[in-house]
Each structure stands twice: as structure tokens, then as C-alpha cells.
Amino acid sequence: AHAEERLLKKLFSGYNKWSRPVANISDVVLVRFGLSIAQLIDVDEKNQMMTTNVWVKQEWHDYKLRWDPQEYENVTSIRIPSELIWRPDIVLYNNADGDFAVTHLTKAHLFYDGRIKWMPPAIYKSSCSIDVTFFPFDQQNCKMKFGSWTYDKAKIDLVSMHSHVDQLDYWESGEWVIINAVGNYNSKKYECCTEIYPDITYSFIIRRLPLFYTINLIIPCLLISCLTVLVFYLPSECGEKITLCISVLLSLTVFLLLITEIIPSTSLVIPLIGEYLLFTMIFVTLSIIITVFVLNVHHRSPRTHTMPDWVRRIFLDIVPRLLFMK
């Protein structure tokens, strides 16, 4: 403990955390960056956001924080508050809600050669373009773009630790399964600035588990749609033909309202299940019209309705003659 106390006093006496840890102004700070996902909390189709619980892995060298372990009782590493040292201002570019940067400043692991490892946890809400065409059998591609907000490539450059997102501590989601999660290094020149800014973009290929929607949405819709056919098997004397058609129509309307509450309010794409319900409602409406016409004809009598002359001429004179009937 005494050795660590002497070491901390030596390291931070005159240390300036606002300056980049480079010997020359032209040197570049290489930041090794990685991402470990702990939980896929939610995918909000309505607001087109993906909420994740991740560990942001960062590693860099600070030449001002070096020491000889033999002078401090072979102390090779210490844990120090991350607020005391220089940190790269890496943020989530496509942040949709909340904080862009890490808010929980955990301690950093400092080694005798100046290497610093910092792995704070964070909960991010990133923007994600949701395509609900094949809902609930859809597959989404959500991205998380990390990079320095103020330092360009000449000041800070990113190096990916791994090509894939670490999923060793991932807690399985009950609604989504991660098919693939890879990271790609990019450098881009933005319209606001003349410098080139690097970033590492992680692409999450996720697929929805459709069992819940299949049991609670698709199968009931199919069964209710089949009830429309039974209307034409009911005898005309039965007074429940219209009631059955209207009940089916109202049930399909309720399911359509449930779908509109889930999917985003966009006119770019319409889910296939929504198109199916819409066309089914059109056919049910036509069946109601046909049923009304059939009931109207069935309950007619010679006393209340006389046969028009044109009907008598067509069906009693012209049609029998075409069919060679007397």
C-alpha cells in the first residue's frame, strides 16, 4: 500500500489530463477499441431504436504514466479513477436517446509500461432502420457507430481489437437472436470539417423469434378468416348470416389495429400480414354484400314483389331458347 501511494504521488504530480499523451504534437494516439454485448434489451419498431447493454473496451498508451516496477516493490499495475487521466472522447454517433458517451466512469487499469485498459459498461439507444415487410418473420440490420467526436485521424486513430462483437457474456433475448455481429473500420470526411475522422461501425444482424406472434396473431387471423366461408353454408332461413360476417370483419379490424401499434408509422413499406388482413377484410365485405342480396331475394314473394318484364323475357324466353328447352 505504501508503494502504491508513493507511485500515485509520483505519477500524478504535474500530470495534465487535458493534453494528449504523446511526446510530439505530430504523433497519433492509437486506441484499440472493442465491444462486448451483455444484453439486447429491446428493439423498438415504433421509434426505430435498438437498446443494448454493452461493455466498451478501450486500450491506449500514456507515456507520462510509466514507472519501473523494481522501484515500487514490483508493482506492475494499479487501478486508478478514470477521471484523473486523459481519455479518448469516443461516442456513439447514431445515438437516438440518452447520452452519447459513457456515463458510468469506472476505474481504469494502468500498467507499468503506460498501457491503459478501460472497459466501462454502458446502455445505448442507437438508431436502427426497421424493415417490417416480412413481420414477424423479419431480419434486421442495426448498426452502432463509434468514433472520436473532436479528434481527427491525425490526432487519434482507432484499431479494432476483434473483427466480431464479443458475445461470451451475452444474455439471450426472448424475442431476438443475434445471427452475426461484425465491426468494420471506416474513415470519413464530413461536410462540417476538413479533417478525416475514423470510426468503427458494428453491424448487428438480428432475427425475430416468431413463435409468440405466430400463436397469438397469425393462427387466430387464419382461423377467423376461414369462418367467412361458413357464411355460405348457412341456410337462408337462418338469421345469423349477417351477424357472422360482421363479427369476422370486426375481429380482423382488431388484429389490424394491433399490428399498427407494433410496426413503425411509415408509408415506405407495408407488412405482408397487413396486406393479408386488408384483402381479407375486402373479401369479408363482399361476402356481406352478397349475403344481403341473397337474403333479399330469398324473402321475396309474389305478393310483395312481382317479376319484372325484362327478367321474365330473359329467363323464360331467351335463355330456354339458347339451351334448346321448351
Image (cartoon, grey):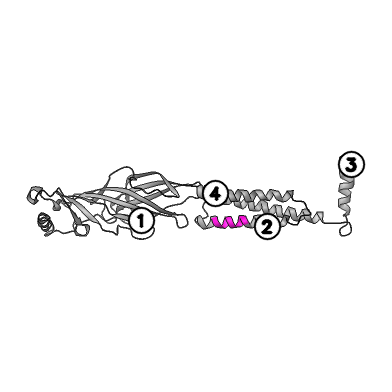
Q: How many marks?
A: 4
Segment colored magenta: 251-258
Q: What element carries label 2?
A: helix
Q: Is residue 115 left or right of residue 230?
A: left
In the picture of the structure, the residue carrying the numbered disc 3 is 321
Q: Is residue 23 left or right of residue 195?
A: left
Nearest to viewer (mark 1 / mark 3): 1
Q: What element carries label 3?
A: helix
- Say the numbered circle drawn on residue 246: 2
Q: Which of marks 1 and 3 is nearer the N terminus?
A: 1
Q: How far apart are marks 4 and 2 (CA)?
A: 24 Å
Q: Residue at x 32, y 55 (%)?
A: 122
Front residue of 326 and 198:
326
Q: What residue type is labelled 3?
A: Arg
Q: In this view, does 282 lie to the left or right of 311?
A: left
Q: Which amino acid does label 2 sit on?
A: Ile
- Say the numbered circle drawn on residue 215: 4
Task: Give the image location of residue 165, x and y in percent.
Answer: 34, 45
In the picture of the structure, the residue carrying the numbered disc 1 is 124
Q: Which of marks 2 and 1 is nearer the N terminus?
A: 1
